[in-house]
Image (cartoon, grey):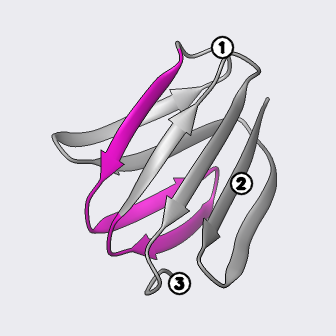
Amino acid sequence: MLKVVLVKPDEILYEGLAESVFLPGEYGEFEVLTFHAPIMSVLKKGMVRIDERIFNISEGIAKFNEHNELIILAGPNAA
């Protein structure tokens, strides 16, 4: 399991554990799983899927670190 935090400027949309996260990367969708290599990516408009939960974002940045934590900073229009 990986720790995931999805935030927009004024609200935390999700904080918890997940098995997988699909992200709309600037160059295509990609998946982050437990023990993925550290990565930082620009996100484009699309869906963020955290296990079975779906969130729509207009833009953002995702960072997965060596501590098995994924932080997703989404634009103000995320829902």
Q: Quadrant of residue 19?
A: top right
From mark 1 to mark 3, how far is it between C-alphas? Answer: 27 Å
From mark 3 to mark 2, how far is it between C-alphas? Answer: 14 Å
Q: Which residue is mark 2?
A: 5
Relative horizontal placement of residue 18, taking residue 43 as reference (left or right): right
Residue, x 41% and y 48% (percent of image)?
A: 23
Q: Which residue is mark 3?
A: 79
Tell me the crowding category of disc 3: few under 14, some 14 to 19, or many 20 or more residues within 10 angstroms, Cα based: few
Residue, x 80% and y 59% (percent of image)?
A: 15
Q: Is residue 38 above or below residue 15?
A: above
Residue 1 marker: none
Relative horizontal placement of residue 50, taking residue 43 as reference (left or right): right
Relative horizontal placement of residue 6, taking residue 17 as reference (left or right): left
Q: SS for tag 2?
A: strand
The residue under label 2 is which amino acid type? Answer: Val
- Disc on the earlier residue, 1 or 3: 1
Q: Nearer the viewer, mark 3 or mark 2?
A: 2
Q: Which residue is mark 1?
A: 35
- Disc on the earlier residue, 3 or 2: 2
Magenta stretch?
38-59
Residue 31, given in percent of the width and then of the height, sits at 44, 34
